[in-house]
Image: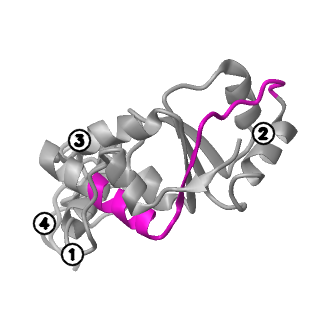
Amino acid sequence: MSAKPLTVEDAQAANLVLVGPEKGRQAVHDLITAYRANRRSGSANTKTRGEVSGNNKKIYRQKGTGNARHGDKRAPIFVGGGVVFGPRPRDYSKKVTKNTRKLALRRVLGDLVRSEKIKTVDSFTVADGKTKSFVTAVNAIATPGKILVIGNSFDEPTYLAARNVAWVQLVTGSDVNVEQLLLAHTVIVVGDALQTLAQRSA
């Protein structure tokens, strides 16, 4: 599995659409913000004074005690009372347009190509399904770090060999997202996956 860095000329020959550092910064920011917002469950919930347990009985008489005037014990100022303006279940998800997604992908791919962080190989398989063999194969291509291997498909032994290697992630060309590309120190593109990325960036 001999690897070679993907140059700008190679990317253009593969019809991979790239943009320079002067464009796409806001698109990348918007898309990453949407990814992280969409992962939020939005399940935080507090009870108001109308929802906590208790009754409406006045805790003591209005006058003659020397204390402040109070109503029932469910008031927010008491321990065990309701919460004022606390979190309620909500949807944090954000929508990003198709053009914004494409621009962000083009920008990130452009940065990776210019910094020579993308390497291409014709094939990537680990026939014996062993983690040791997988690590050896990856180290022969890239230096250790956060490595992203992009292929159109992987066989079962390769998936089995990769599942215990935390610093390497296998992902298909149709599923890889901008956040995964940003976090990777090295990106290994296998075979026709480059054409898949080119179609997504077009």
Mark 2–mark 4 Cα distance, whole angstroms, equals 77 Å
Looking at the image, residue 123 lies above or below residue 157: below
Helix, strand or loop under label 1? loop
Quick one: SS at disc 4? loop
Viewer-nearest of discs 3 and 1: 1
Q: Give the alpha-carbon distance from disc 4 to disc 1, as whole Å.
A: 69 Å
Which of the labelled discs sits on residue 22, or is there none? 1
The residue carrying mark 3 is: 51
Q: Quadrant of the N terminus?
A: top right
Tag 2–tag 4 contact (CB < 8 Å): no
Q: According to the image, label 4 marks what residue?
A: 62
User: Residue at coordinates 82% horizontally, 46% vertically from top-left?
Assistant: 136
Foreground mark, 4 or 1?
Answer: 1
* Amino acid at pointer 2: Phe
Residue 159 appears in the rendering: yes
Is tag 2's residue or tag 3's residue first in the polypeptide sequence?
Answer: 3
* Sequence-first tag of 2 and 4: 4
Relative placement, left or right, of 50 versus 37 is left
Extent of the magenta region: 105-129
Image mark for residue 134: 2
Q: How many marks?
A: 4
Rendering coords of residue 98 (x, y %): 15, 43
Q: Secondary structure at mark 2?
A: helix
Mark yes or no: residue 42 visible. no
Amino acid type assigned to the residue bearing label 4 in the image: Gln
Task: Point out the image quarter for the C terminus.
Answer: top left
